[in-house]
Amino acid sequence: MDAGRSAAVAALLRDAEQAHAVYEADVLNGVYDEAWPRWYATYAVEHGLGAIMGHDVDVDALTTFLTESYAEFAAADPKSAEPWADHIGTRIAAEL
């Protein structure tokens, strides 16, 4: 696996996290966005995930992947010491 690609995907997820916080605050008036995986997937695809991966990435496939991967990350016992963006970024780089 390419560590540089994993790091770039994780950085993109952190960028999405920051942009999504603004979206929740400004557009949703502070309401939790239940549809966050689709928002993140759209953001990632629109902000160069395909170029990082070296191939096109489908928003629907990434939405499903984010939903499932985050659920597994959140349910892990013991909890990972690794930040979620790093963990899921590594999985995206390896599995998509």
Image (cartoon, helix red, strand yellow):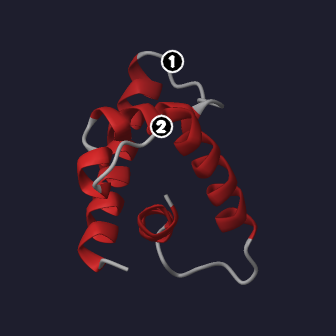
Mark 2–mark 1 CB contact (< 8 Å):
no
Give SS at disc 1. loop
Horizontal and vertical percent position of residue 81 = 53, 82
Say the numbered circle drawn on residue 28.
Answer: 1
Determine the CA span between mark 2 and mark 1. 25 Å
Residue under the image location 47 percent in, 27 percent down: 24
Residue located 41% across and 36% down the image: 21
Q: How crowded is mark 1: few (under 14 residues within 10 Å), some or many (20 or more)?
A: few
Query: Which residue lies under the disc numbered 2?
Result: 58
Quarter of the view holding residue 37: top right
- In the image, residue 50 sits, relative to residue 84, either above or below, namely above
Q: Quadrant of the N terminus?
A: bottom left
Q: What residue type is labelled 1?
A: Leu
The x, y position of residue 92, in whole percent, is 47, 61
* Above or below 21: residue 66: below
Residue 83 against residue 29 in the figure, above or below? below
Q: In which quarter of the image is residue 76?
A: bottom right
Question: Which of the two discs, 2 and 1, labels the residue nearer the N terminus?
Answer: 1
66 horizontally vs 17: left or right: right
Nearer the observer: mark 2 or 1; the answer is: 2
Q: Is residue 92 left or right of residue 43?
A: right
Assign a secondary structure to mark 2. Answer: loop
Residue 49 spot, x, y in % from top left: 31, 47
Residue 43 picture quarter: top left
Callout 2 amino acid? Asp
* Residue 27, percent from left and from top: 43, 15
